[in-house]
Image (cartoon, rainbow, N blue to C red):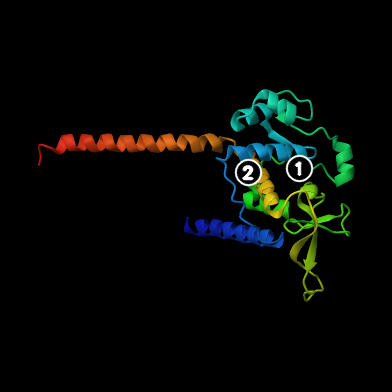
Amino acid sequence: MTSRFFARFAVFAAGLLMSLSVAAAGGSATESAGNDLSDQASLQRGAQLYMNNCSGCHSLKYMRYSRMAEDLGLTEQEVMDYLNFTGAKFGEPILVSMPHDPATKWFGKMPPDLSLISRVRGSDWIYTYLKSFYLDETRPMGWNNTVFPNASMPNPLWQLQGLQHAEFGEPDEIGERHVESLKITRAGTQTSLQFDQTARDITNFLQYVGEPAALKRQKMGVWVILFLVALTFLAFLLKQEYWKDVH
């Protein structure tokens, strides 16, 4: 029994170390997103930014327009007029209108669905990824990313962020040069602080999409705590009543 336990633990530890090494090799350190699911205005901005800049390629197949409207405090008219670009019905999931075969030809494969990206990668990863695109003429799309090297997509937010170039360090022992920093060489329509908020809003929205129930769970948590406080007070009064004659 003991040997079987240690064998399973060894397999688990090896897998964990392998996952960490792969994650470390996959890109640079991430920044803290600092997003807040209780900020409804941020979620609404994130939904608008996502639908305008990302939904052409990336679906959210586990999210329905009607659920998004309910959770984000939007009306059906607002969602259908400003967030629905495929002609889908209000109760249908958020899919892309881009055909599969042309998408595979353009990008090498169909762009992935992002419904669960925050649960797979984490909010900090998404936030840093959105900020880490840079021009790279060696890539087919003309772009690269320090967090996800050789990403097969251009920067969807370049007009807001501006054009960013990489500054490389000295070659290492095998002759590879690594990105040391990123620098905006042509300003976009937003300042650095404004774009940070844009990336944070999209990250916030994708975190919500990954677990919509988290919004209601946070609201219910307050009432649960109040109930427990009230229950504790009643239990204290009951204890006082039982023990008053003993003293």
Residue drawn at x 52%, y 56% is 4
233 vs 48, nearest the viewer = 48
Q: Nearer the viewer, mark 1 or mark 2?
A: 2
Kindly report the distance in space between the C-alpha atoms of the residues bearing marks 1 and 2.
19 Å
Would you place residue 171 above or below residue 234 in this image? below
Q: Residues within 10 Å of mark 1 (few under 14, many from 20)?
A: few
Q: Amino acid at mark 2?
A: Asn
Coordinates of residue 90 in the picture (x, y in percent): 70, 24
Circle 1 sits on which residue? 112
Residue drawn at x 65%, y 44% is 201
Circle 2 SS class: helix
Circle 2 sits on which residue? 204
146 vs 200, nearest the viewer = 200
Would you place residue 45 above or below residue 7 in this image? above
Residue drawn at x 68%, y 28% is 65
Coordinates of residue 243 in the picture (x, y in percent): 15, 38
Would you place residue 52 above or below residue 173 in this image? above
Quadrant of the rendered structure where residue 246 is?
top left
Q: Amino acid at mark 1?
A: Pro
Mark closer to the chain start, 1 or 2: 1
Circle 1 SS class: loop
- Residue 63 shows in the view: yes
The quarter of the picture where the C terminus appears is top left
Coordinates of residue 1 in the picture (x, y in percent): 47, 55
Does residue 203 appear to the left or right of 160 in the view shown? left
